[in-house]
Structure formats: C-alpha cells, structure tokens
C-alpha cells in the first residue's frame, strides 16, 4: 500500500511537474511568440516607417531634383536660346553683310561691264566710222583716180580721134584740092594747047 501511494504521489508530482513545465514552456513560448510578434510588428512598423520616410524623402528628393533639373534645363534652354539667338543674330548680320558685299561687288561688276560694253560699243562705232570713212575716202580716191583715168583716157581717145579725123579730113581736102588743081591745070593746059593750035 505504501508503494502504491508513493507511486501515486510520484505520478501526481510528475504530472504536476510536467503540467507546470508545460505551462511554463507554454508561457515562455507564448511570451517568446508575443515578443517575436511584437518584434516583427515593430520591425514591420519600422520598415514601413522607414520605407514611407524613404519614399517621402526620395519623393521629395526626386521632386527637388526634378525642380532643380527643370530649373537647370530652363536656365540651359534660356542660355542656349540666348546663345543661339546671339549666334543667329551674328550669323544673320554676317549673312546680311556678305549679301551687301556681294550686291556691291555685283553692282560694281555690272557698272564695270556696262562701262566696258559702252567703251566696246563706242570703239566699235569709232572703228566702223573710221572704216566707213576710210572706205569712202578710198572709194572716193579710187573713184577720183578712176574718173581721172577715164577722163584722161577719154580725152586721149577724143584727141586721137580728133587727130585722126583732122588728118583724114586734111588728107581728103588735100586730095580734093590736088585733084581740083590738077583738073584746072589740065583744063588750062588743054585750053592753051587748043588756042595755040587754032592760031
């Protein structure tokens, strides 16, 4: 009976110890779990807060960066536009100056060409006039020479013809006179002979 009671007591003690231990373990596990859960929650909250803060900070930084970038871009664009405007203005001025120089050169060339054309035309006119005058003078001289030659030839021919005619006429007259004289002489001789014979 004593051993049985002792065994019961031991069992009860063991059971109580086991229950206590289990309870302690459960409490400890629950506490640990609670602590872990709390830690997890804290970590999650911290992470969330950090993430939120990071997101907010990153967002603000991004916004600031964006604003800075916009300002920088605007400034660069303004500067570039200003520089481009200045460059365009300089280029336009240079182009205008170049165009003006080209126009002046072209006008000068046109004036020179016109003057040269006028000089050439005047020279051509002078040459033509000189040639015409020379030709006319030469022609007049040639015509005068021809006229002189023709007149001389005509005069010579006329003189020769007149001389020939005169010679012929003189010869004819001489012949006629001689014939008449001969006839008269013959008739006189015949008459003298007849008179002498009759006497």
Image (cartoon, helix red, strand yellow):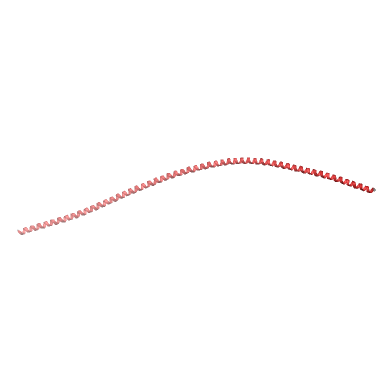
- The answer to whether 83 appears left or right of 124 in the picture is right
Residue 145 point in image, percent of width and height: 29, 50
Residue 8 point in image, percent of width and height: 92, 47
Locate residue 47: give its quadrant: top right
Q: Which residue is situated farthest in the bottom direction here?
A: 197
Q: Considering depth in this image, is 181 or 13 the residue closer to the camera?
A: 13
Q: Which residue is situated farthest in the right direction here?
A: 1
Q: Considering depth in this image, is 24 or 141 the residue closer to the camera?
A: 24
Locate residue 188: give its quadrant: bottom left
- The answer to whether 43 appears left or right of 191 in the picture is right
Locate residue 46: give its quadrant: top right
- The answer to whether 57 appears left or right of 142 in the picture is right
Number of on-image labels: 0
Q: Quadrant of the C terminus?
A: bottom left
Residue 13 point in image, percent of width and height: 90, 46
Q: Which residue is situated farthest in the left direction here?
A: 199
- The answer to whether 178 appears left or right of 114 in the picture is left
Q: Considering depth in this image, is 32 or 174 the residue closer to the camera?
A: 32
């Amino acid at each position: 009976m004593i051993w049985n009671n002792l065994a019961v007591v031991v069992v009860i003690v063991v059971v109580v110890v086991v229950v206590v231990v289990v309870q302690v373990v459960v409490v400890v596990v629950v506490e640990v779990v609670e602590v872990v859960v709390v830690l997890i929650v804290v970590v999650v909250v911290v992470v969330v807060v950090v993430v939120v803060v990071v997101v907010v900070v990153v967002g603000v930084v991004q916004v600031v960066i964006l604003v800075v970038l916009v300002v920088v871009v605007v400034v660069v664009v303004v500067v570039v536009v200003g520089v481009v405007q200045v460059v365009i203005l300089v280029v336009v001025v240079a182009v205008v100056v170049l165009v003006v120089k080209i126009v002046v050169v072209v006008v000068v060339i046109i004036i020179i060409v016109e003057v040269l054309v006028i000089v050439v035309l005047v020279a051509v006119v002078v040459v033509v006039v000189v040639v015409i005058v020379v030709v006319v003078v030469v022609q007049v001289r040639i015509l005068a020479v021809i006229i002189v030659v023709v007149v001389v030839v005509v005069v010579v021919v006329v003189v020769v013809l007149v001389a020939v005619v005169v010679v012929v006429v003189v010869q004819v007259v001489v012949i006629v006179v001689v014939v008449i004289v001969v006839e008269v002489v013959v008739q006189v001789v015949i008459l003298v002979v007849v008179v002498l014979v009759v006497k």
